[in-house]
Amino acid sequence: MDFLTEFPEMERQNLRDLKQGIDAGFRGFSREYGELLENFFEPLLWFLVWLQKLLIAAPWPLIILIICALAWFGSRSVKIVTGCALSFLVIGYFGMWEDTMSTLAIISVATIVCIATGIPLGILMARSNRAQALITPALDVMQTIPAFVYLIPVVMLLGIGKVPGLIAVCIYAIPPIVRLTNLGIRLVDKDALEAADAFGANYRQKLFGVQIPLALPNIFAGVNQTIMMALSMVVIASMIGVAGLGLPVLRSISNQYLALGLMNGLAIVALAIIFDRVSQKYGDRLQKHRKGIHHD
Amino acid sequence: MNKMTQRIAIGLALLFGANTAMAECGSIQIADMNWPTASLMAEVDRFILEQGYGCEVEVVAGSTVPTFTSMNEKGKPDLAPEQWTNSVGAPLKKAMAEGRLFALNTAPITGLGEGWWIPPATAKKHPELKTVQDVLKRPDLFPYAEDKSKGAFVTCPAGWGCQLVNANLFRAFEMEKKGWVLVDPGSAAGLDGSMTKAVERGENWFGYYWSPTTLLAKHGMVGLDFGVPFVGRKAWDECIALSEQECADPQQSAWTESEVFTVASADFTKRAGDDGVDYIKARVYPADVMNSMLVYMADNQAEPADAAMEFLRAHGDVWKSWVSAGVAAKITNAIN
């Protein structure tokens, strides 16, 4: 009867030993390889610091101009460009310029890192069903595991600061780009591939000439989602010492500073909306182009 | 035979004077705060009051502000073993003046407080680093990851009161000019992680923390003398503890002494009687004993109640001085 009512759980002592063993193992790993990992990420840190300093040191009208130019290039929409300029002016006016630049730096680098590693992973997944079977559960874990669970090991390995923050952001933000690259390539018309085969295209030509261009709208939806998720991690990343808009939000949480929290929170939202609209419009335009070809 | 027992009972009662308390004590609520030292103290108090003074004790969970509010408004729980007063200062003073709450013990743990710390390995390697002033001369020993030419001073997580204090002391000691950066760890987990990582790796670390805490005890962190005296209550409260805008010219100062009280309700002082009150007054945990208990709790992931037993068994020399010989005998019986 006991067996049915009491779950046959592991003996307490053994469970404790197991947990302590895992902790000790990780500590050993951190002592052994932490330094090495830190050195490995050193260039990334250097780049992040450089970009942040550059963004903060550059004259603000120039930054706004560049951002508006990028927005125009992406969206070709006067409405979005005006909104973009206005929100950055308001952000600066309310004294959040430096924090916003810090956040912009880390989000841009995080997005680049995610795209640079996510798209090849997505292509690999699309190529091989076995890779897909292996990577999909890993992506599920990355998206759902509470951030605090991996923040602590990351801090133990790399300390606090930008690089561990960037890694935490990327863990959470990379799944959409991987998934959507995979999906986009898998959804490419069989007919199109057949035609490419008929023309005698080799694997490389098929991938870069047919599959990726046709999957671009999906890939762009992935980039868009990745940026959004990276922005939503700004506050979490600040919990391990990443400077930026997240820190004032944390400060306002522990002190119930309503206005401070609201302003910085809205600044994050403004960044998110700008990124989202611009990348979405860009994706739409890619799609329109493709539709155009179909109609012709 | 019956008469004999009675006589012995009366004799014992006269001898220890505890039976009267047993009759009066009744039920008492002790507040268990959500950190290890307070939990341990609550469990030790429970055991000693139950076994030594015949109280019926219930331990209720809580944390600094909610528990204090409840004590202040409702007079329950009856006893808060480790009440940090910095966040409840004014209402506590008022309640004490009105005779509703009593600070029975104004220093239940010695060596307690906030300050700036370095790892033991750093202190050993650089014995010249005795005071904060000594450390401030050597930013090169504590390089900041994002700018190696600067030294990193890890401050309080964003939004904590101590963040303002550290920022003002940072200015008072002219640390920026001396090549230091104020690093915000973002959260308690970030602060803990940055210290633990440095200690585990044998790296240098310089930052803020408070004692008694498991982390400081486990790593044997070395608290630094500030090399300057405490600037005084007025200058602290009206400048250093405020935000940068409100403190134009911060003075160099050591960290203020933290006030931690054992707070009891009026009800407690009546029920537990003079003996119980005397016990609480005498009950002072030496810093090293508390630290060793914190390490014990962390290493064994011990429940507070188990840790209390361990404390009573291993540190008889400490707690026996808190109680009368008779009560000590009862407790010794109960733990064996």
Image (cartoon, rainbow, N blue to C red):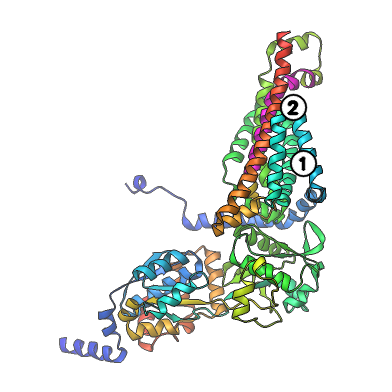
Up/down of A191 relative to B303, above or below: above
Secondary structure predominantly adopted by residues drawn in magenta: helix
Magenta span of residues:
A208-233
Dot label at residue A121: none
In terms of depth relative to the viewer, which is nearer, A220 or B312?
A220
- Determine the chain carrying the residue at label 2: A
Give the residue at x 69% y 22%: A185
Q: B246 or B316: which is nearer to us? A: B246
Image position of B40 (left or right of B165): left
Callout 1 environment at 10 Å: few (<14), some (14 to 19), or many (20+)? some
Q: Looking at the image, how many numbered discs can be counted on the residues?
A: 2
| Residue B120 spot, x, y in % from top left | 70, 72
Please provide percent x and percent y for residue B46.
38, 73
Mark 1 or mark 2, earlier in chain: 1
Q: Locate the C terminus of chain A by quadrant.
A: top right
**Which chain is indicated by disc 1?**
A
Tell me the quarter of the picture where residue A132 sits.
Answer: top right
Would you name the residue on which mark 1 appears? A64
Label 1: which secondary element: helix
Q: Give how far across and how far down residue A110 sits, in percent.
A: 72, 42
Can you say whether B1 is above or below B240 in the image? below
Q: Provide the residue designation for mark 2.
A: A76
Near-viewer residue (B84 or B314)? B84
- Say whether residue B114 is visible: no
Question: Residue B4: image x %, image y %?
Answer: 19, 89
| Quadrant of residue A114 within the rendered picture | top right
Query: Height in image: A267 above or below B66?
Result: above
Q: Are marks 1 and 2 on the same chain?
A: yes
Amino acid type at mark 1: Ile
Q: Residue at position x 79%, y 39% from top? A: A65
